[in-house]
Amino acid sequence: MGGEGSSTEFKKKILEEVKKLTNQGKHKEASELFQIYFPNIGGNNGKD
């Protein structure tokens, strides 16, 4: 149970970083970071 909160916080920090990169116009970097930590969400649905 203790790991769930920290995992959620970590994911939240990743999403904040993705948003920051996007706002800076670094869309490629933001997309790559997002795909590393959330490979099954959006995009190509795992079909590389």
Image: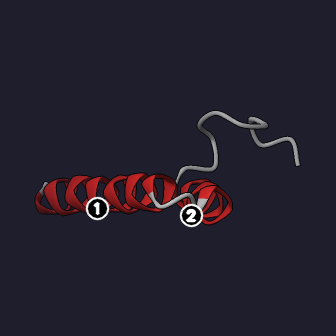
Figure quadrant of residue 43: top right
Task: Please rate how many residues cluster around mark 1, counting C-alpha atoms within 10 Å: few if below 14, some from 14 to 19, many from 20.
Answer: few
**In the image: residue 44, left or right of residue 7:** right
Q: Position of residue 47 (x, y in %)?
A: 86, 41
**In the image: residue 27, left or right of residue 48:** left
Labels 1 and 2: the sequence-earlier one: 1
Q: Amino acid at mark 1?
A: Lys
Q: Looking at the figure, which quarter contains the N terminus?
A: bottom left
Q: Nearer the viewer, residue 26 or 1?
A: 26
Query: What residue would you read off at disc 1?
Result: 13
Residue at the image point whose x is 56% and y is 57% from the top: 25
Q: Position of residue 41 (x, y in %)?
A: 59, 37
Residue at the image point whose x is 40% and y is 52% from the top: 19
SS class of the residue under badge 2?
helix
In the current view of this chain or complex, which residue is farthest to the right? Answer: 48
Residue at the image point whose x is 50% and y is 53% from the top: 22
Q: Nearer the viewer, residue 29 or 7?
A: 29
**In the image: residue 46, left or right of residue 32:** right
The label number, if any, that marks residue 40 in the structure image: none
Q: Position of residue 34 (x, y in %)?
A: 55, 55
Task: Please rate how many residues cluster around mark 2, counting C-alpha atoms within 10 Å: few if below 14, some from 14 to 19, many from 20.
Answer: some
Q: Nearer the viewer, residue 20 or 32?
A: 20
**In the image: residue 19, left or right of residue 27:** left
Query: What residue would you read off at disc 2?
Result: 33
Look at the picture and state if 36 lies above or below 39: below
- Marks 1 and 2 in Cβ contact (< 8 Å): no
Q: CA distance from mark 1 to mark 2?
A: 12 Å
Q: Amino acid at mark 2?
A: Leu
Image mark count: 2
SS class of the residue under badge 1?
helix
Look at the picture and state if 4 lies above or below 46: below
